[in-house]
Amino acid sequence: MIAELVDRVLSGDDDAAWELEEATEDDLAALRPHLVRLLDADVYLPERMFRAAGEDVQRAAVARIDMGVTRNFQLFRVLAETRGPVVEAAFVRWLKEPPPGIEAGVLASFLAGSGWDFDDDGRAREICGTTAYGLAPTGTTAPSSDRCPWCGGELWTALDVDTADPRVAGALAHTSWRGRLRIVTCFLCALHGTKYVDVTPDGGAAWSAYTGESPDGRVLVAEPPPRVRLTPGEQLPDLHFADGSALGGRPWWLQDPEYPACPACGKVMAYVGDVAPSDVLANDVAEGAIYLFLHTPCGLAAVVTQND
Ligand SMILES: [Zn+2]
Ligand SMILES: [Zn+2]
């Protein structure tokens, strides 16, 4: 049945592509013998169908890119789905010497958007989690005596978790953080640029001087921030969680990816999770997403906000 569907896809039958995706959703390995045929015909969508690709398919894809075929980055996305040593080596090479028609800077931001960073000796560093848990409202956070230097309002506790909880340890394994991680920011000023937070493993969290000055010296009438506490719940089946707050996994960006660089050392910060404003406010209409990042060696967290 899979072979038949692949035949139909290759003959240009769009319905068959949907059927194939559905038929292989829970068994990507069944597609493996057919991936080279799809690749040879430049049929890569959806890229997730290639997650089970073996090194033969990866090498074939790398060769096509070396010949200048990328189909508007689709082929890069295929490789980013499969990962593994063949793919890593190819990306390290392309970052130094881009394939035909591709700019190195564009490729680097594509890789950052895929949750990858490469160090100087070409080793890949995961900046996203390999497991994810939903964050659910349970109880309240204590009021803070710390104030937002921009508006004078009370700082908001966006996250307060501890790696003593195995779910937290799993979701944050890629960050190398050990201990209590508390991230505070100003709920009202969160929209105005990236905020940085000095964090320590005992749960210490303070507005960082790296955040800089308020953009236009704004003074607001401050309301108290939400006091809802979010704690890890069920493990999520998908690392790209689109619906509600989550710890670990990969960000579901509402706009273009904005992985912040650590303001102290310049490295891409690791993704911690996101908070959906509707989970901490007593209404369903709050939109947007608040993304949390961490660079453990420098003890800095970052808060990035996007709106729909
Ligand atoms: Zn503020
Ligand atoms: Zn750093």
Image: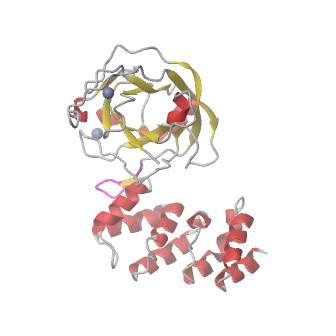
Closer-to-camera residue (179/306):
306
Q: Going by the image, does 170 lie left or right of 295?
A: right
Q: Residue at x 39, y 81 (%)?
A: 68
Q: Going by the image, does 42 lie left or right of 120?
A: right
Range shown magenta: 118-126
Q: Residue at x 61, y 64 (%)?
A: 52
Q: Is residue 61 above or below residue 142?
A: below
Q: Position of residue 9 (x, y in %)?
A: 67, 80
Q: Does 51 lie within the magenta span?
A: no
Question: Would you identify the image quadrant in which residue 306 lies?
Answer: top left
Q: Position of residue 230 (x, y in %)?
A: 54, 27
Q: Is residue 47 above or below residue 13?
A: above
Total labels drawn: 0
Closer-to-camera residue (215/122):
215
Question: What colour scheme has been applied to the protein in the rendered image?
Answer: secondary structure
Q: Residue at x 23, y 38 (%)?
A: 264
Q: Position of residue 50 (x, y in %)?
A: 59, 67
